[in-house]
Image (tube, grey):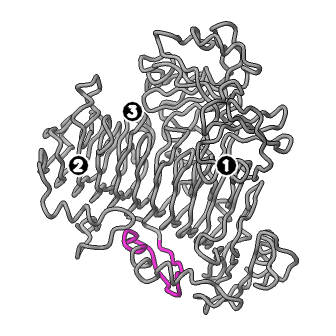
Amino acid sequence: MATGVFTLKRCGVLVECGARLTAWFLTVVLLCSCAAAFARIDAAGSSDDASMQAQLFVTPNGKGEACTHRRPCTLQTAQERVRSLAPAMKGDIAITLLDGTYRMSAPLVLDARDSGRNGHVIVWRAATEHGAVLDGALRVRRWKLVNRKMNLWSAAVPAGTQSLQMFVDGKRAVRARGYGCKSPSQCRYTPEGLTGVDARLASFRRPQELVAVISARWRDFHCPVASIAGTTVTMAEPCWHNTVVDSKNGWSYASPKGKSFQGVEWFENAYELLGTPGQFYLDGQTSRLYYVPRADEDMKSADVELPVAKSLLDMSGTLDLPVHDVRFDGIVFMHTTWSGPDTPDGYVSLQAGYLVTGKRDKLPDNGEGMMRMPTAVTVLAGSQIAFDRDVFQALGTAGIALAGGTRNSMVNGCTFSDLSGGAVFVGDTTASPVDPRGKSSGNVVKRNVIDSVAQEYRDNVGIMGGFNDGLTIDHNTVENLPYTGISVGWGWNYEGNGDTQRNIRITHNRLSNFMLALHDGGAIYTQSQSPGSVVCANYIDFSGTSHANGIYLDERSRGYTVHDNVVWNTSKLSLSKGEKNDDQNRWLSAWASWSGNLVMTHNWSDDTHTKPHNPGSTKVFGPNSLELKSLPEEAKSVIANAGADALATEAADRCAPSR
């Protein structure tokens, strides 16, 4: 359970949050319906504003400094006004974003000066829920048909435009791709690149712009091409070297030179690869965008959005001067991009959206020091920051990060869909920061819907918690992911014997359609020594998943109690289809002899694995109800109370710490 205590004002109700963080959001939701909280704000700002000290209004084309409903200003002008008002706050201050699209080429940047004071909160809110959109794209117009046979259309973009994503009428397009090769029958790894690729690639006008996309087990790689001669590819460095750099963990097993390498899935980013509807190519040298539309798209009227901003909101404090007491309500964060995969570093995943960058002679055994996937919204050294009913949609990056010592903050009731990376990052991957305040603590991720994320960078997960002292992940719906749903912890077996985090609570979540592309993960995945932690009352549906674990207590997972979970429709197929690792395809796996202090009781599953995977003196397994053909009423109650939309159907919370 979280140890911090903080207060947040919501719909006129002052909520205190402390040891019982697992319940407070539900109370807020029941007291404050979305309709009440986002009744349209009239000229006087008459919603739930009785306690407001000041209200400022902004619009995409705002002018002047009045910042009133009739004379709204810009986001930046409102920010300056708030900074002047904050030191003497006697009530909350609201910045109301009137409906519209706020085009952003750079993020809104907040620091400690933008914080609430004297126990009050700065509220950035949409006038109508989801009516205000912070949009990092430029709209591309004036399309012309340039090749009738291919149905290829083109439009000009500003010189210097860089983007790896495009959206047409709200639907994601993909960069032109093709000419993949299987290994070892076609292409093979060499220390410099690949041999045996399709000879046509060498004839492309700019083969050095190509990017090879590869996956191996749980890892995803996007490495640029340096040159092609015949059927031999020289890959860009340090990307290619970093894909195979190793540590005691044996990372090279899941790399292009490892046994799990099956070839290049596709090359992307060339004019010559165009032809498939829904694919595009951006020619940076001529500043022209090319696209083959889908059957239902009319390029004369289509809304074509090309993301150009890397991020939309950057909240950065320091450990001595955190940014604090700020809330974002009902705002849409949309359209970002990131050019990293096209640079010599490429995209080299270690795991779960953490990347190997720079020239590496070896990897640290504990995996520390990796770069986190960029996010549309980043909070560093924040305190009492809240994101409530916001939407993160159509992003070329990940969604949001609460990191760098952020504490007592929340992501509640938000929707994450169609993201290139993961949805939520909480905490960092350093077990023992130099300043202990640098470890994030007391944060809550609750009542969120996470659907179809990690669309491009497939190693990303729905919710990624690194090292945290107190983290609650409760009542989320997580579905349709290429890899793991919820992941917490880090460090493998190389953080020593001491505790690395504590009080991680993963409760009442609903997970389905996970592990759709990669391997060696699960619906819920844990690592590291985590006393006081619990995995409770989650509903995991294996439908659509053929090679995964339900609850995966990997490596040095210690200190977890796993109870009252329902893991259903478990896979019966993968082992017979060649899955060699016996730590996969189980309702629960705790395979490592160095895991321990685990209690795994009172769970329900139709899995036929009725014995503990790797028993030990500090692993308590059972009683559990396994090999079931149908579920008892108690298990059905768990299912009914799992996920973002579930109501509180049980008289008592079976996951309460006192249970």
Left or right of residue 147, residue 354 in this image: left
Nearer to the camera, 574 or 236: 574
Q: Residue at x 35, y 52 (%)?
A: 511
Q: Position of residue 243 (x, y in %)?
A: 56, 24
Q: Which mark is residue 519?
A: 3
Residue 155 shown in magenta: no
Q: Disc 2 marks which residue?
A: 568
Q: Position of residue 306 (x, y in %)?
A: 71, 48
Label 2: how many Cα within 10 Å (few below 14, some 14–19, many 20+): many
The earlier-in-sequence mark between 1 and 3 is: 1
User: Is residue 163 rendered to the left or right of residue 487?
Assistant: right
Which dot, 1 or 2, sits closer to the camera?
1
Q: Residue at x 22, y 58 (%)?
A: 564
Residue lying at 26% horizontally and 70% vertically, measured from the top left: 653
Q: Using the image as rendered, state which of residue 564 and residue 163 is in the foreground.
A: 163
* Residue type at the position of mark 3: His
Q: Is residue 558 left or right of residue 111?
A: left
Residue drawn at 69 percent across, 30 percent down:
149
The alpha-carbon separation of the residues under discs 1 and 3 comes to: 39 Å
Q: Secondary structure at mark 1?
A: loop
Confirm whether residue 374 shows in the render: yes
Magenta region, residue range? 5-25
Q: Which residue in the protein does label 1 denote?
A: 298
Q: Secondary structure at mark 3?
A: loop
Q: Quadrant of the N terminus?
A: bottom left
